[in-house]
Amino acid sequence: MAIAIHAAQVVGLDAQPILVEVDLTSGLHIFTIVGLADKEVQESRERISAAIKNLGAVAPHQKSQRVIVNLAPANIKKEGPAFDLAIALGYLLASGQVAFDPSGIIFLGELGLDGALRPVSGVLPMAMTARAHGFNTLILPRGNGVEAALIENVAVKEARTLAEVVEHLTGRKNLPTLPRTVPVAASNANALDFKDIKGQEYAKRALEIAAAGGHNILCWGPPGSGKTILARALPSLLPSLSFEEALEVSKIYSIAGLLKQTLPFVAHAPFRSPHHTASHAAIIGGGTLPRPGEVTLAHRGVLFLDEFAEFDRRVIESLRQPTEERTVTITRTQGTETFPAHFMLVAAMNPCPCGNAGNPSKDCTCTPGAILRYKKKISGPILDRIDLHVEVPAIAYEKLSGGDGEPSSAIRDRVARAREIQRERFSGLPITVNAEMNLAQLKQFISVTDDLIETLKAAHERYQLSARSYHRVLKLARTIADLAGSAVVAKDHLLEALNYRPKQEL
C-alpha cells in the first residue's frame, strides 16, 4: 500500500500542493523518483538515503527492495530540493520505521547528508497555497518560518534536523508554532535624500510628479550632471507599500530567493537597477521554465535603466508590453506564464556617445553619424511610452556650493496626499494611480474644457502628438492638478505637462 504525504511546488508566481506517494515492494534494490522530476530532484535520492542512515534508521539502499516515489500531478515539472523532507518522511512511514498521521500537513525542506534541514526559496507562496487548500500546518527548515508566518490560519513550525521532525510527529518532542509575523513599515534608510542633491530643481519637480502619478520618466544630460543620483533618490519620495502590495511583492522576492531571513517581507517600493549588459532574459524573464526578470522584481516600484541607450536594442524594445499592459508574458515549450510588471520606468542617458552634445562648456567629439546612430537606439514607440522627458544640465558652481534643498520628507508628504486623492478617485477600480487609467477612465475623470481644447490643439500641431502621447499628457496634467489639490485640470496644469514633452528628438 502506497503512503501519501504532501509537499509543494512553485508554478510561475504561485504554488501548488504536490502529493508525494511512496511504495515499497520486495525485490532487487531500486530507488526511483517519477512524476516529471528534474535532475535536482533525482539527486535527492542520495541525500535522503544518507540522512536516513545518519538518523539511525534503515536507509533505502540498505535493503533489497524496490522504492518507487511518485510526485503528483505528473504533468507539472518538479524542480528544486524542497521535496527532500517529504520523500524522507514518506519512506520512513512506508517502511514502518515511524508512525504518524500526515494529513493536513505540508512538509518542505532540503536535507543535508547529516540530516540537517536547509532553507528553500518560495516558501511564502507555498504558505499561501497551504491555506487556500485547507492545510493547517507547515513544517519547514529553520530560517523559513518567519516568512511563512506572514500568512494567517496556518500553523508554522520550524525544525533544524530530520530527527527533530520525526520526534515531533511521533510525540516525543513538540515543535512550537511560530507567532504570526506582522510587517512593520520601517523608514527606508538606504534611500538618498533630495536635500543632499544640489540644484536641478526642474528635474526634482519632474521626479515628484512621476512619483505622485506613477509615470515613466527619461532624464538626459551630460555625464556628472546628477541623473543617476536623482534616480536613486526617487525611492525616498515613494510611500510605503500597503500590506496587500507588500505581500504581492514579497511573494515575487520569495520565489527569486531574495528575501532576507531577518526581514522576510518587502515593505518599501523595490528599486531595481540592472547593468546595461544585462540580457533579455534577465530583464524580461525567461528560462526553460519561465522565471521572473527585473521588470517583475521591480513590480510596485522603480526600474532604473542607467545608460539607457547602451542596453541591447532587443531589451529596450521588449519594454513596450510591460510599460503599456503592466504585465509580461513569457512563452516557452514548457509552458506560458504571465508575470506582473507594474513599475515606474526611470531611464537616464547621455545626449551623445561622448556626452557633451549641447554642453556650452565642453566640445562634443562625436561625428554626426555617431550621434544619429546613438539616438536611433531609442525608438519612437519607446519614447512615446515615456511621460516625462527631462533635461538635466551640468550644474553651475554656485549651485554646488549652495545650501541644502527641500528634504525628501516634505516632497513625500505632497506625493502621499496626491496618491490619497487618486485612491479615493479610483475607489472600487483595479487601479491606484493616474498613469494606469485607460481611455474610458480618462474620459470619466478628466474634463477637457474649451480652453484646454485650444491648448491641446496647438500642442498637437507643435509636438506632433500621437494618440498615446495625447492621452499621456492628460494623465500627467491630472497628476499635476492632484499635487496642487485641484479638483479640475486647469490650463496651467496642462501647460506644465506639455513642458515635459521632448523639445527635440533625442
Image (spheres, rainbow, N blue to C red):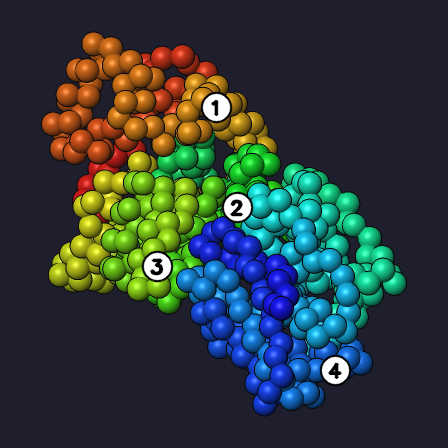
Q: Which of the two labelled residues, at mark 1 and mark 4, occupies the earlier sequence position?
A: 4
Q: Which of the two labelled residues, at mark 2 and mark 4, occupies the earlier sequence position?
A: 4
SS of the residue at dot 1? helix
- Quadrant in the picture for residue 82: bottom right
Q: Which of the two labelled residues, at mark 2 and mark 1, occupies the earlier sequence position?
A: 2
SS of the residue at dot 2? helix
- Quadrant in the picture for residue 219: top left
Between 316 and 306, the one lying in front of the other is: 316
Residue wearing tag 3 = 335
Three-letter code, disc 3: Gly
Q: How far apart are marks 2 and 4 (CA)?
A: 43 Å
Residue wearing tag 4 = 58
Task: Tell me the crowding category of disc 3: few under 14, some 14 to 19, or many 20 or more residues within 10 angstroms, Cα based.
Answer: few
- Image coordinates of residue 482 in percent, x first then y, are 43, 20
Three-letter code, disc 2: Val
83 left or right of 208 in image = right
Residue wearing tag 1 = 423
Q: Are marks 2 and 4 in contact (CB under 8 Å)?
A: no
Q: Which of the two labelled residues, at mark 4 and mark 3, occupies the earlier sequence position?
A: 4
Position of residue 158 relative to residue 506, above or below, is below
Please state which of the two labelled residues, at mark 2 or mark 4, is closer to the viewer.
4
